[in-house]
Every structure is written in C-alpha cells, then in structure tokens.
Image: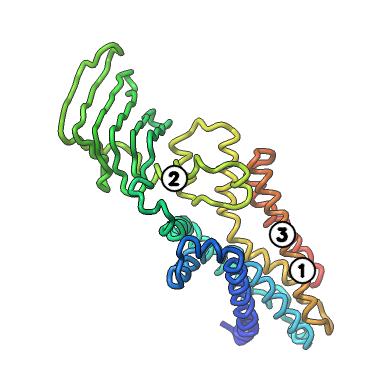
Amino acid sequence: MRLLDRYLLRELSLPLSYCLSAFLVFWIAFDLISHLSDYREVGLGGANLLLYYAYMLPDLLLIIVPVGLLLGMLYTLTNLARHHELVAMRAAGISLWRVSVPYFAVGILFSVSLFVLNDVWLTNCNEKAEELLNRNKKDSSNPDKKWLKNYNFRNSREGRTWNFSAYHLDTGAFRDAQVTWDLPDGTRQVIISKSGAYDGNAWVFTNAVQMIFIKMDAPEEKNVTNRLEMPLFTETPELIRSEVKINSLNSITASKKVFLSLQEISGYLRMHPDLSPERRALLLTQFHGRLAAPWTCLVVILIALPFGAVSGRRNVFVGVASSIVIFFAFYVMQRFGMALGTSGRVPAALAAWAPNVFFAVLGLWLTWRQR
C-alpha cells in the first residue's frame, strides 16, 4: 500500500468512527426512550437489554453503516479540499479516480461484510431478539406456545402434503401426523403416525402405519411399525419454519423492509414452483432487496466523491447537509422501489437495484465532470 493510500485511509478512519458510533448511540437511545415502558412491562433487565440490542445489531448496521460512511466520506473529502490537499494531489498528476481507490476498497469491504453479516446471522438474531423480548411475558410459561395447532403445508415440487394436529417449531416434534404423496406411476402413499420428530438426518415416525394405494378404494399394502424413518423426505424443520414465516408476511410489511434470507426464499421457491404472480413478486423483491441493500456502501462512495471533492475553501458542514439530503433521497427511492416491486407493478430486480444503479451512475457522471 502506498503512503498516499495510508494517509487517505487515516484521514477517513477518525470521522468514520465518530459517525458510526454517534449514529449507533443515537439510534439505541432513541429506541430505548420510545420503548422503555414496553421493556419494563416484559421485565427486560439491564443485562438482557444489552443482549437484546446485541441481537438487533446486524439489522441496525444495515442502516447505520451506509449513512455513517457517507457522512464520514463527505467530511473527509471536504476537509481535504478546504486545505487544498486534493488540488496538490491532482497537480502532481494523481487523478481523482486514483485518490478514490482506498475509499472504494473500504466501500467494497463494508458491502461484503454487511452482506455476510445480514444474510447469515440476521434471521437468527431477529428470532433470538423476539424470543428474549417475549421471554418474561405472562404467557411465556405456557409450554404449548411453540406448538402450532392443526398445521398443514404442502411441498408442491414433490407433491407431498403434511398434516399435523400439533407441530413444534423449535424441535420439529409432532403429534398425529399424516403425510400423503403420489408417485409418478399413479400410486399414492400415506403415512399416519401418532407422534414423531426430526432427528437431524431424517423424519422419524413412531406408532406409524404406512399404506400404499394403487386403487383409491382400499390400500394394496399396509405396514404397521413402531418406528419408521423416511430419509428421502427433503423437507426439514428449517424449511417449515421458513414456510410459517413467509406465509405470515404480507405485501405491506414486505415493502417496508427485507425480512427474509436468501436461503429462506430459495427454499420456499423450490417447494412452491406454482406460486401466484403476486406472491412470487413479493418473494423475488425480498430476494433482490437482500442482494442489493449491502452494496449501498459502495454507492455512497460514488456519491461522496463529487460532492466532497469540490475545490475551494468550503465550510465542512456543507458536506454534512449534503449527506442528509442525499441519504434521504436514496432512502425514499429505495422504499418506493420496494413497494412497487412487492405489488408486482415493476420487475423485482429493477425495483431493488434501481436506487443503487441510479445513484451510482449519477455519482460516476458528476465525478467525471470534475476531472
């Protein structure tokens, strides 16, 4: 790494750290003041409160890091321009694009880190935060709160229908289950079981009856057993949890925020190839929204360059005001795009990626004009 790159990164590191810390503290303080009575009502103490915000951190970083990076970049570049350091660099034959190389590296690093953090840990963290928040509620002592009553779902891809009188979301245990599916030759198979669970590798049915119907009036074969393992079933408790989560998601909620991971959406689409256009649009918008959101960090670098690198002695706080206006415009366009994509009015990929592409192209054009 050249001396110039190290200098530029050092100039960015301090304001970036201040911006990220300030936004994080501000958001937590605002949320704490707004929901303090709710936290007291559920008995969330000091240690659990810290743990709750730790679980919420991946979701917060997706909002805080881009705006903090934008503000830090604008402050740094404006400060360099005020002291004519950018002019000196360009007079020495160093282009603005070369000056921006370490900043692009920071943007890519943050984008990749946010993508991995949110897609791998965000879903589990949100579930743990919700569980922690509800742990001390009055009905939390109810042992059946995780049991779904009379739950049914269908794996459309493999033509398999599951019916449970009760299913446990965490353990995969079930009671009074019936699984029905048809083979390519027209044969129908049915498993009826009093209880069972997923053992990590296969579904295990206890006190089970397995029947094979060639004609629909009576079974041709019947097998009664105390234990029946079905390793060929591709359904897993994770897929069922995703099914429950996705089925509870409506278009209004989905337009506000990306709630689903890529794995959840991919698994659901594999099980349901015959989804309605409206439901498919919702899921694909969530899918592309998950892909596009972290790359906001790279986009803000492109936006900050032309706004922050203007020559002349300019007030540093002009960069601060610019960052607020730019981020607000980006946020509005992002929310508007998600709403259009979720409702099926525009293609999902266009709805999710349009804000990134628009502001990236705008930043490239404005930077090119300053050559």
Front position among marks 3 and 1: 3
Amino acid at pointer 1: Thr
For mark 2, does the 10 Å Cα neighbourhood hold few (<14), some (14 to 19), or many (20 or more) residues?
some
Q: Is residue 178 above or below residue 73?
A: above
Give coordinates of residue 335: x percent, y percent.
68, 52
Q: Earlier in the sequence, mark 3 or mark 1?
A: 3
Q: Is residue 358 above or below residue 308?
A: above
Which one is nearer the viewer's eye here, 286 or 259? 259
Badge 1 element: helix
Separation (CA) of disc 1 from disc 2: 44 Å
Q: Earlier in the sequence, mark 1 or mark 2?
A: 2
Amino acid at pointer 3: Phe
Amino acid at pointer 2: Ser
* Residue 367, numbered label: 1
Separation (CA) of disc 3 from disc 1: 18 Å
**Disc 2 target residue:** 242
Q: Image point 41% across, 58% down: which residue? A: 135
Q: Is residue 361 visible?
A: no
